[in-house]
Amino acid sequence: MDFVLTEEQKMLQKMTRDFAREEVEPHVKEWEEQGGIPREVFDKMAKLGMLGATAPPEYGGSGMDHVSYHMMTEEIARACSSLRTAISVHISLCQTNIMKFGNEEQKKKYLVPLAKGEKLGAWALTEPNAGTDAANQQTRAKPEGDSYILNGTKMFISNGSVADVVIIFARLPGTERREGICSFILEKGMDGFYPGTVESNTKLGLRASPTAELVMEDCVVPKENLCGSEGQGWEIAMDILNHGRLSVAAGAVGVARASLEESIKFAKEREAFGRPIAKFQMISKMIAEMAMNVDAGRLLVLRAASLMDRGEDPTLAVSMAKLFTAEMAMKAADDAVQIHGGYGYSGEYVVERYFRDAKVCGIYEGTNQVQTLIIAREVLKD
Ligand SMILES: Cc1cc2nc3c(=O)[nH]c(=O)nc-3n(C[C@H](O)[C@H](O)[C@H](O)COP(=O)(O)OP(=O)(O)OC[C@H]3O[C@@H](n4cnc5c(N)ncnc54)[C@H](O)[C@@H]3O)c2cc1C
């Protein structure tokens, strides 16, 4: 894929690959057992400028283009999908929300420490009854004097229990569906704002990523923490989801590539009937398809990232990248387990983690069904 990358992008790719190999991969098992990633890991990434990848330098970021950022995302996901999830939420969702829709004061107060990695971000749209049907927001934001009073519960929020800054979507009284939704910037420790149940190593995959409920009980949020204008929340959420979805797609390429690389290694080493299993055509076919799909997925990610960099509407390209990579990552991880036979099913080999981690790429930030609906809508429109 080198032919599409600049020298600078290749250097960034190498730097992230080295970091992932040395500082991430050896520790993932331990992080999964602990159900979280130590903050020192984020501190190290901050020093390398990774935590403010796309934020402009004047706001403490590295000012990367989206192609560079997603080369980085793939490398992190190649080593650890839980860490990739944390970074995607921190950068693509939380920071981009403030970068694109926040005012100057909000950027100075929140974007700068987030981009520098001094604070960790999260982004909360999903509720118990508002997942795919995100317009069914039940969290309420009642204007009162110089504040809004927030009440409601968010669910399945990545980084939810560890984030310092959280974007919360809530609706104004007397509004329905897409109208009246607002995005707010909340801070850890605000009165009436706290994490509920946290799931990390109890879920199928992403076992080092804390996924939390977030509860707001008469939480007083100052009016200056409204991000964007009143009622702009739906537009904001849909815009930001394009960014989040593309980082999931880049992450899916990373897991699929990891599945491919482990499969190649194992198929060359493992012998049956007196020869390496790579010599059997049914095994080599799985590997050939994996290699082809990883490259195709990456090209779809790079196309969508280039459209973002050029300021064009990336919606169709993003949904194609997300759907294709989510499906192909699941297939690649499945085939990787198959190639490893019984060893693939045991905790001894890393491919069982890829299998567990790949699945969520087709669920969060818009399921495979939702991406299909978006692609159909976009290609069928006049
Ligand atoms: C590990 C993890 C981390 C997450 N992190 C975050 C986060 O940080 N922030 C956040 O806001 N959310 C987060 N989510 C939530 C995630 O985005 C939702 O789970 C997802 O959008 C699906 O919503 P749901 O779970 O309510 O499923 P539902 O919406 O109930 O969907 C159930 C099934 O019905 C299908 N379906 C629904 N509507 C239609 C339709 N119209 N046509 C066809 N099929 C349909 C879906 O595709 C799915 O297969 C996370 C989820 C997980 C599992």
Image (tube, rainbow, N blue to C red):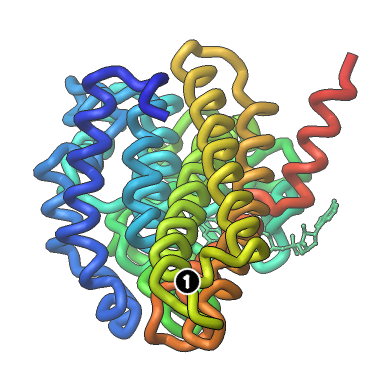
Closer to the camera, 313 or 58? 313
Q: Position of residue 382 (x, y in %)?
A: 90, 13
Q: Residues within 10 Å of mark 1 (few under 14, many from 20)?
A: some
* Image quadrant in which you'd find residue 329: bottom right
Q: Amino acid at mark 1?
A: Pro
Using the rendered image of the protein, determine whether residue 371 is visible from the camera's viewpoint: yes
Q: Quadrant of the N terminus?
A: top left
Residue 268 versus residue 352 in the image, above or below: above
**Along the horizontal axis of the image, is 326 left or right of 374?**
left
Farthest-out residue, front:
274
Question: Where 3 sits versus 342, above or below?
Answer: above
Q: Which residue is mark 1?
A: 276
- Viewer-closest of 279 and 26: 279
**Residue toward you, 146 or 82:** 82
Numbered-mark total: 1
Label 1 residue SS: strand
135 sits left or right of 107 in the view: right
Q: Is residue 208 above or below residue 64?
A: below
Q: Quadrant of residue 313?
A: top right
Look at the image and tell me whether residue 194 can be seen: no
Image-based side of 354 in relation to 120, left or right: right
Q: Nearer the viewer, residue 361 or 196?
A: 361
Q: Position of residue 208 (x, y in %)?
A: 36, 72
Residue at 42% x, 86% y is 347
Residue drawn 43% across the image and 25% down it: 100
Q: Position of residue 126 (x, y in %)?
A: 60, 58
Q: Position of residue 295 (x, y in %)?
A: 53, 38
Q: Quadrant of ligand 1?
A: bottom right
Residue occupying image coordinates x 60% and y 66%: 280
Image point 56% across, 42% down: which residue? 245
**Ligand 1 within 8 Å, label 1 CB:** no
